[in-house]
């Protein structure tokens, strides 16, 4: 095995890991059977919650209500912070109108902010609600009209919603919000009635429809989990997609002490966070095209006449900004909230590299420059590995003339050829597999960087230079339409941008610095490999393309320098080039 075979092996294994691992994992590590609801005939222990929060019925197939009409159809209190703006519907106490002020839908500075929550009945409705369930009470529902203590919820002005039923039982939701994306709901029930009651607080998220890029169990080409997600008993769970819940009779149930659950999109998250010391029952549900996440304590609390019961939970509604998620996990004790970003199997590499990239962005103020800086740091980190790989290549190159002689001598006797080659390796103290290990060590690093550059909202809409205005999108310039001069947009599978072209060219240059394989099949594979990868990488984020191009350039420079330290290899390369030129001249003659 020479260096070319090592590279082929690395490329193929990288492809298998990137695009085939989820299917292997799903076969050998199948999703565990979910905990399902207890049958109605089964006796429940005293104090256990036996009622469920009802899933809202799927709306009739009628034209969706315009957003403006829905927002004006009921009384509301405003929500306004540095990062969020919207309103809370006093009918049902629904948090159903939130836009993210620091994130735009399009690249243009004057484009509309990203809308996360929208009222029920509108297109892509998405909202949260806090409530109560129990026995001996008339609990408020999604039609109850609440009375607010103020007109605007801000980070400095909390608002309390209150409602009293016919039995003089009072319900209150004290809402507060911080400067980022966390809403705290402190629920108080005051039993002004004459008999004791059993009560439990709940929280739910409801959304109509699912994102276009939603996944089933997290197994898609790009390996991004988009859909139901939670942390149950300190274990992140990515096993459920929207379709999985539908196919599981419309329900997936879990029990946990603390944790959280909700819906994760590529860049956005809605998550319900119960009290972290309370045992809870968590559920994902599907009914028609309505999907719900809900959480309720596993036991009722008994509230005597004249007494009160307090409970607290939180709602995260915003962007998956790593620094913000990490701060909530550490400061509020919310387990693995930063794992709403699906870092994958190599999270232990991806997370430290993310923080390096984040720090470099703070230093340079340009995400493209930060990616270049990270590339250089990674290559420096991998320099000892690259040296080992190069040393292996040098050894293999030194014995290539002898290998060729053996191939010519025993070309009709393959078993004898293999035996003689192994004997040659033993005599020359050459390990043909030594170059594979360094390449294998680089694969997790590449995969981790792939995840960072693909999922990082910090890179969304970030420019680099010239035509690269958004590193989270593919390179927009392509020669197919003469770099935008022709008035049409080519299909994505042939829209090869400048960065993917540079990727192919730099890979071709790297091949030129390596010894040419003697096997004709290998030669053909390597002839098409750079251009094949050019097409494969074209639809990916420009930030990932930039990393790969820079990595290739650093590798070329590194190889040039290493060749300068091994004159024998340089002379051998010159001799091979001369022989190749002579062969071409003879063929023409």
Image: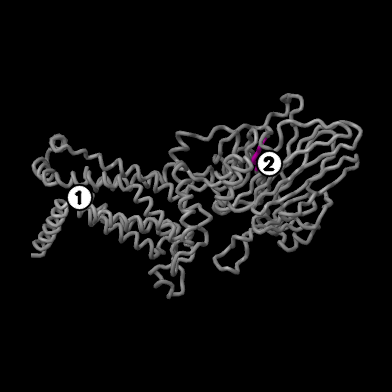
The residue at 40%/64% (across/down) is 497
In this picture, is 147 found above or below 41? below
- Image coordinates for residue 296, horizontal then vertical, percent: 71, 37
The reply to whether residue 22 is in sight is no
Is residue 584 rendered to the left or right of residue 243? left
Pointer 2 and pointer 1: residues touching (CB < 8 Å)?
no
| Quadrant in which the C terminus is drawn | bottom left
Q: Residue furthest front?
A: 363
Secondary structure at numbered mark 2: strand
State left or right for residue 539 relative to residue 318: left
Residue 294's disc is 2
Residue at image x 45%, y 48%? 353
The magenta span reads: 281-285
**Viewer can see residue 297:** yes
Mark nearer the N terminus (2 vs 1): 2
319 relative to 159 in the view: left or right: left
Of residue 151 and residue 1, the one placed in the foreground of this image is 151
Q: Is residue 15 magenta?
A: no
Q: Residue at x 44, y 58 (%)?
A: 370
> With 11 as the anchor, is 350 left or right in this view?
right
What secondary structure is found at the residue carrying circle 1? Answer: loop
Residue 277, position in %: x, y?
A: 67, 34
Measure the alpha-carbon separation of dots 2 and 1: 60 Å
Q: Name the image quarter holding the N terminus.
A: top left
Q: Residue 101's x, y, as percent?
A: 64, 61
Residue 547 x/y as whole percent: 39, 56
The residue that label 1 is drawn on is 517
**Residue 187, quarter of the rendered image:** top right
Work out whether 165 lies above or below 488. above
């Amino acid at each position: 095995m020479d260096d070319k075979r090592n590279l082929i092996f690395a490329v193929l294994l990288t492809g298998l890991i990137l695009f085939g691992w989820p299917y292997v994992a799903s076969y050998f590590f199948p999703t565990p059977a979910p905990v399902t609801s207890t049958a109605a005939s089964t006796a429940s222990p005293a104090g256990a919650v036996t009622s469920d929060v009802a899933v809202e019925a799927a709306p009739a197939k009628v034209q969706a209500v315009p957003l403006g009409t829905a927002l004006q159809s009921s009384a509301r209190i405003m929500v306004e912070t540095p990062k969020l703006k919207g309103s809370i519907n006093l009918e049902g106490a629904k948090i159903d109108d939130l836009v993210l002020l620091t994130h735009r839908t399009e690249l243009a500075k004057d484009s509309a902010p990203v809308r996360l929550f929208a009222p029920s009945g509108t297109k892509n409705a998405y909202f949260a609600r806090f409530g109560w369930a129990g026995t001996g009470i008339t609990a408020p529902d999604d039609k109850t009209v609440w009375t607010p203590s103020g007109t605007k919820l801000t980070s400095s002005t909390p608002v309390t919603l209150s409602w009293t039923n016919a039995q003089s039982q009072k319900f209150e939701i004290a809402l507060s919000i911080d400067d980022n994306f966390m809403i705290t709901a402190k629920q108080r029930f005051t039993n002004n009635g004459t008999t004791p009651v059993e009560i439990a607080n709940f929280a739910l998220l409801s959304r109509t429809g699912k994102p276009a890029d939603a996944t089933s169990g997290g197994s898609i080409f790009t390996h991004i989990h988009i859909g139901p997600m939670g942390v149950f008993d300190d274990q992140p769970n990515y096993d459920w997609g929207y379709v999985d819940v539908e196919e599981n009779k419309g329900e997936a149930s879990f029990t946990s002490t603390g944790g959280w659950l909700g819906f994760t999109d590529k860049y956005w998250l809605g998550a319900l966070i119960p009290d972290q010391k309370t045992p809870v029952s968590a559920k994902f549900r599907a009914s028609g095209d309505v999907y719900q996440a809900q959480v309720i304590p596993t036991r009722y609390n008994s509230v005597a006449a004249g007494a009160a019961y307090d409970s607290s939970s939180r709602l995260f509604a915003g962007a998956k900004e790593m620094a913000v998620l990490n701060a909530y996990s550490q400061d509020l004790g919310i387990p693995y909230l930063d794992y709403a970003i699906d870092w994958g199997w190599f999270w232990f590499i991806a997370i430290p590299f993310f923080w390096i990239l984040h720090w470099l962005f703070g230093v340079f103020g340009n995400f493209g420059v930060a990616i270049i800086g990270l590339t250089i740091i990674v290559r420096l980190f991998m320099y000892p590995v690259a040296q080992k790989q190069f040393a292996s290549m040098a050894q293999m190159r030194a014995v290539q003339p002898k290998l060729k002689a053996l191939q010519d001598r025993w070309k009709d006797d393959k078993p004898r050829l293999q035996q003689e080659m192994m004997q040659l390796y033993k005599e020359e103290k050459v390990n043909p597999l030594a170059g594979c290990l360094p390449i294998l060590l680089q694969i997790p690093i590449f995969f981790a960087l792939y995840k960072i550059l693909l999922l990082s909202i910090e890179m969304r809409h970030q420019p680099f230079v010239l035509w690269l205005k958004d590193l989270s999108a593919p390179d927009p310039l392509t020669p197919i339409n003469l770099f935008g001069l022709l008035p049409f947009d080519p299909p994505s599978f042939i829209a090869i941008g400048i960065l993917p072209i540079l990727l192919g060219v730099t890979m071709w240059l790297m091949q030129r610095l390596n010894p040419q394989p003697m096997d004709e099949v290998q030669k053909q594979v390597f002839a098409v490999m750079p251009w094949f990868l050019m097409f494969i990488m074209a639809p990916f984020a420009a930030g990932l393309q930039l990393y790969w191009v820079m990595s290739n350039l650093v590798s070329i420079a590194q190889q040039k320098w290493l060749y300068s330290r091994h004159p024998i290899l340089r002379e051998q390369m010159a001799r091979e080039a001369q022989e190749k030129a002579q062969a071409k001249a003879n063929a023409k003659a």
